[in-house]
């Protein structure tokens, strides 16, 4: 542990309200007593009101007003941080080791009542996500650092599932977005001359250059990413009326889907009415197929035909694998 960590640890222990001797602090932190004296002097010099009482029952303690100050976290804040750490770890947060150290410190210096409460709330709180082998951690760390410090990167990027070799691109990373179980980097692509989004699991290699960049003022990686998911809307296009009939629970799920929630016009118990751009309709068959027979298309006719064509193509694909 660093000097700063040890000094903070002394504060945690004194904040419990107990009077502790230098020997007790040294034993707890596995330090020499003289080192504890130096840290106490440094804390006092920085303005921390530590009281030193001499005598048989003497020791160090904090001024009462200071122990009541919001320097450290209360139980609700501790519980929230531990729960947030569970979410972050399952999402593949790139600084997992640092996060574990922070949570360990948090738990180490709570009082017994708080520690028991945190354990009880953590035991019944789980997040299930796809397993990560940790191989993307270094890529995410490099991207996060370059976003913060403004370094241009050279990236080897594989565009898809084919056998084409990766492309080399110069990228100014503007932000990282976690969406539907994957991390995405949003940044300016020098090869295409525009801002684009890239799946981080398709990045084969990264190297930092000496070139620096300035992120556009007010730029939001989140907003740009979400906007790029939907087909471009053109004022000249005439909106298409799409009506889907089906079971209420399936319709509830469909209406809450990120691709359709913005286009919902009217909803009854067994029908949902959407107004979509023509190109957006082309994306619907694969989405609707996942609902099986719980939904069916009422209009337009073009979407019905696309559903039939999509199902027919899938049927022919799988027929060739039958024995």
Image (tube, rainbow, N blue to C red):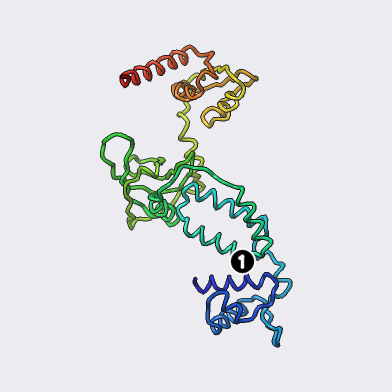
The residue sitting at the top extreme is: 301
Residue in view at x 39 percent, y 49 percent: 136
The image quarter in which residue 119 lies: bottom right
Residue in view at x 45 percent, y 50 percent: 215
The residue sitting at the bottom extreme is: 55
> For this view, does 164 lie left or right of residue 219?
left
Q: Where is residue 266 in the image (x, y as percent from the top left)?
A: 62, 21
> In which quadrant of the rendered image does the C terminus lie?
top left
Tell which of 238 and 122 is nearer to you.
122
Tell me if residue 2 comes above or below residue 204 in the rendering.
below
- Whether residue 236 is visible, yes or no, is no
Q: Tally the marks.
A: 1
The image quarter in which residue 190 lies: top left
Tell which of 55 and 199 is nearer to you.
55
Element class at badge 1: loop
Q: How crowded is mark 1: few (under 14 residues within 10 Å), some or many (20 or more)?
A: some
Tell me if residue 118 comes above or below residue 291 in the rendering.
below
Tell which of 231 and 28 is nearer to you.
28
> For this view, does 182 lie left or right of residue 267?
left
Residue in view at x 36 percent, y 43 percent: 189
Residue on which disc 1 sits? 109
The residue sitting at the right extreme is: 64
Tell me if residue 170 comes above or below residue 16 in the rendering.
above
> For this view, does 137 lie left or right of residue 18?
left
Q: Where is residue 161 in the image (x, y as percent from the top left)?
A: 32, 35
The image quarter in which residue 14 lies: bottom right
């Amino acid at each position: 542990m660093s000097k700063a960590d040890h000094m903070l640890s002394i504060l945690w222990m004194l904040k419990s309200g107990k009077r502790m001797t230098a020997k007790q602090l040294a034993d707890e932190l596995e330090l020499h007593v003289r080192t504890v004296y130096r840290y106490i002097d440094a804390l006092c010099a920085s303005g921390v009101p530590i009281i030193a009482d001499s005598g048989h029952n003497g020791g160090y303690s904090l001024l009462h007003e200071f122990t009541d100050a919001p320097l450290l976290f209360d139980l609700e804040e501790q519980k929230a941080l531990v729960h947030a750490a569970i979410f972050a770890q399952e999402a593949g947060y790139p600084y997992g080791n640092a996060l574990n150290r922070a949570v360990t410190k948090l738990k180490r210096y709570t009082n017994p009542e708080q520690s028991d409460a945190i354990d009880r709330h953590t035991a019944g709180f789980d997040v299930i996500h796809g397993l990560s082998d940790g191989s993307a951690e270094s890529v995410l760390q490099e991207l996060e650092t370059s976003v913060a410090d403004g370094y241009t990167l050279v990236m080897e990027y594989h565009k898809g599932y084919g056998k084409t070799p990766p492309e080399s691109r110069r990228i100014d990373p503007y932000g990282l977005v976690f969406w539907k179980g994957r991390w995405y980097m949003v940044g300016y692509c020098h090869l295409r001359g525009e801002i684009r989004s890239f799946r981080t699991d398709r990045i084969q290699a990264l190297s930092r250059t000496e070139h620096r960049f300035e992120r556009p003022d007010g730029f939001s990686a989140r907003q740009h990413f979400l906007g790029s998911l939907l087909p471009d809307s053109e004022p000249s296009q005439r909106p298409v009326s799409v009506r889907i009939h089906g079971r209420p629970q399936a319709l509830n799920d469909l209406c809450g889907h990120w691709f359709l929630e913005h286009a919902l016009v009217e909803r009854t118990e067994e029908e949902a009415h959407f107004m979509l751009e023509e190109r957006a309709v082309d994306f619907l068959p694969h989405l609707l197929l996942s609902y099986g027979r719980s939904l069916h298309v009422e209009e337009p006719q073009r979407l019905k035909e696309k559903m039939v064509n999509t199902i027919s193509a899938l049927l022919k694909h799988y027929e060739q694998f039958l024995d």
